[in-house]
Image (cartoon, rainbow, N blue to C red):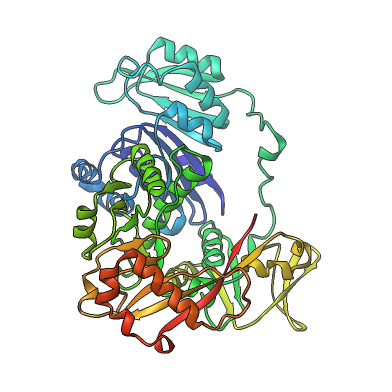
């Protein structure tokens, strides 16, 4: 591993696969070694399967036994949250080191994985204790995911394991073990490269040219895209037509972070669950209470159909992700009177989107150009961003994150996108309204105060193209609040607030069929 880490060039990745994350010791030791031997531009990616992940407190107790790993274990513990079933990605060292946890059965998770693994740590339970995992199906998946000449090591030396790995394409041998283990298995993958299957699943050729990109649009989508590329060693020019970031739909004072899930384990639901965990870990960089808060989100069961849907979700997911509450329980948790119980997401909450955009855009490798509207033009191998006759920046790759305005780019003019106007209302907090302790949602939502204001919303208008806040939509938002909690409406004195004095903002959502 030391040699392969040292050989990685700028932008190249050493990928390690593991069956059995456990306490994460293998990951921490690999990270420590990589940090010592690899060039600054190289990256480490570790993919590890774990069916029974440790709770955070148990992981902390276990890792305390290795104080020499404290700098790395503290970083792991700081990111070890919202780790729910499925694929959960954790990023360290500014994105130079990545850990993807596959939380579930190895025989279910590995077939979903697309990777080229350079080294395997087979470190699950012994075959006698976990015979179902050590099977030809597992060995075939290891072969499918292996890069040419990938290495493999495991403490087991069982004959059927060695024979199964040989049949899958690995050249295996018994070697001296460590500690009290007399022998172990070590090998190299010498089988054929994996078949890509359907052509649309084929991996694109590695980018061989200049690692530079233009990202047009400084909202959440553009800033996240820019940060993702920059963390992988790309030089990114982020272009925003307004004077600063997050001036359109990403500019609301509070947005609600929660999950729209299906009880049927759909691919979209699995993606949402992974994205939620990634976002929660990302938010740890921001100032809690000012830029975000994990105060939880309560989704009210406002009718029988919604109550049935929530019951199905509660049966399908672990209680630390979501669980049902009776009305009395919900009221105690929320701090205000409510018309019904509902589904509570304890790790969810609210976010100040502009702060998240600023944090993402601060990733090293990003240059921000603001206050200039641009058009793109192809010149040779580059995309050039022009403001008038001036070329502001050029790069071989361009990403458009401009919502429905992407149709201003001629090749995208026919995309079937729709703009939906939404308006939020900002309500001054009162001593009584500060009792609200969690976001509460029904047809609309209301959040605990950020500073001295609650955010309430949001309207849906499929026709208007005007972004000036309207009194009618302020009134509509107050009616949404009345449905959520008449008690909170009264605490805010909302019925006595002149509509013309209410503050708010409107922006356009972008939707597709």
Nearer the observer, 113 or 277: 277
Q: Residue 7: percent from the left, percent from the top?
A: 53, 45
Q: Is residue 20 above or below residue 439?
A: above
Task: State whether residue 425 appears in this view.
Answer: yes
Q: Residue 21: percent from the left, percent from the top?
A: 35, 36
Task: State whether residue 254 appears in this view.
Answer: no
Q: Residue at x 30, y 78 (%)?
A: 451
Q: Is residue 109 above or below residue 8?
A: above
347 lies left or right of 421? left
Q: Residue 324: percent from the left, percent from the top?
A: 29, 47
Quadrant into which the N terminus falls: top left
74 lies left or right of 353? left
Q: Quadrant of residue 440?
A: bottom left
Nearer the observer, 473 or 32: 473
Q: Is residue 354 above or below residue 154?
A: below
Q: Quadrant of residue 183?
A: top left
Q: Residue at x 28, y 63 (%)?
A: 438
Q: Is residue 452 above or below residue 327?
A: below
Quadrant into which the C terminus falls: bottom right
Q: Residue at x 67, y 70 (%)?
A: 405
Q: Residue at x 32, y 85 (%)?
A: 496
Nearer the observer, 395 or 509: 509
Q: Residue 442: percent from the left, percent from the top?
A: 39, 60
């Amino acid at each position: 591993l030391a040699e392969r880490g040292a050989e990685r060039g700028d932008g190249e990745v050493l990928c390690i696969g593991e069956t059995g994350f456990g306490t994460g010791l293998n990951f921490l030791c690999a990270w420590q070694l990589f940090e010592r031997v690899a060039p600054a531009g190289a990256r480490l990616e570790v993919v590890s399967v774990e069916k029974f992940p440790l709770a955070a407190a148990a992981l902390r107790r276990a890792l305390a036994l290795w104080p020499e790993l404290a700098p790395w274990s503290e970083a792991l513990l700081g990111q070890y949250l919202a780790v729910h079933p499925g694929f959960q990605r954790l990023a360290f060292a500014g994105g130079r080191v990545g850990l993807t946890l596959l939380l579930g059965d190895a025989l279910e998770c590995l077939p979903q994985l697309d990777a080229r693994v350079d080294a395997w740590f087979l470190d699950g339970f012994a075959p006698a204790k976990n015979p179902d995992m050590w099977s030809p199906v597992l060995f075939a998946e290891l072969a499918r995911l292996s890069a040419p000449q990938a290495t493999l090591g495991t403490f087991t030396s069982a004959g059927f394991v060695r024979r199964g790995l040989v049949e899958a394409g690995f050249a295996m041998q018994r070697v001296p073990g460590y500690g009290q283990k007399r022998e172990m298995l070590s090998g190299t993958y010498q089988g054929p490269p994996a078949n890509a299957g359907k052509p649309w699943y084929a991996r694109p050729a590695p980018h061989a040219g200049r690692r530079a990109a233009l990202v047009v649009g400084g909202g959440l989508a553009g800033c996240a895209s820019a940060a993702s590329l920059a963390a992988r060693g790309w030089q990114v020019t982020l272009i925003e037509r307004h004077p600063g970031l997050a001036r359109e739909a990403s500019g609301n004072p509070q947005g609600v972070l929660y999950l729209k899930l299906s009880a049927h384990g759909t691919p979209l639901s699995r993606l949402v669950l992974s994205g939620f965990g990634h976002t929660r870990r990302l938010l740890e960089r921001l100032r809690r209470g000012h830029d975000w808060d994990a105060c939880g989100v309560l989704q009210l069961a406002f009718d029988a159909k919604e109550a049935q849907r929530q019951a199905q979700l509660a049966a399908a997911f672990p209680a630390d992700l979501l669980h049902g509450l009776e009305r009395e329980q919900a009221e105690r948790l929320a701090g205000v009177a409510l018309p019904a119980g509902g589904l509570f997401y304890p790790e969810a909450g609210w976010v100040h989107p502009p702060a998240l955009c600023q944090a993402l855009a601060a990733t090293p490798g990003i240059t921000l150009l603001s206050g200039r509207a641009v058009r793109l033009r192809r010149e040779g191998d580059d995309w050039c961003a022009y403001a008038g006759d001036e070329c502001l920046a050029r790069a071989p790759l361009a990403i458009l994150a401009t919502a429905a305005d992407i149709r201003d780019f001629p090749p995208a003019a026919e995309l079937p996108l729709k703009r939906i106007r939404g308006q939020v209302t900002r309500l001054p907090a009162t001593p009584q309204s500060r009792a609200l302790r969690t976001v509460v949602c029904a047809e609309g939502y209301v959040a605990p105060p950020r500073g001295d204001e609650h955010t309430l919303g949001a309207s849906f208008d499929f026709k208007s193209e005007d972004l000036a806040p309207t009194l009618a939509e302020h009134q509509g938002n107050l009616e949404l609040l009345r449905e959520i909690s008449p008690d909170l409406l009264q605490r805010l004195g909302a019925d006595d607030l002149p509509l013309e004095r209410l503050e708010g903002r409107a922006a356009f959502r972008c939707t597709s069929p």
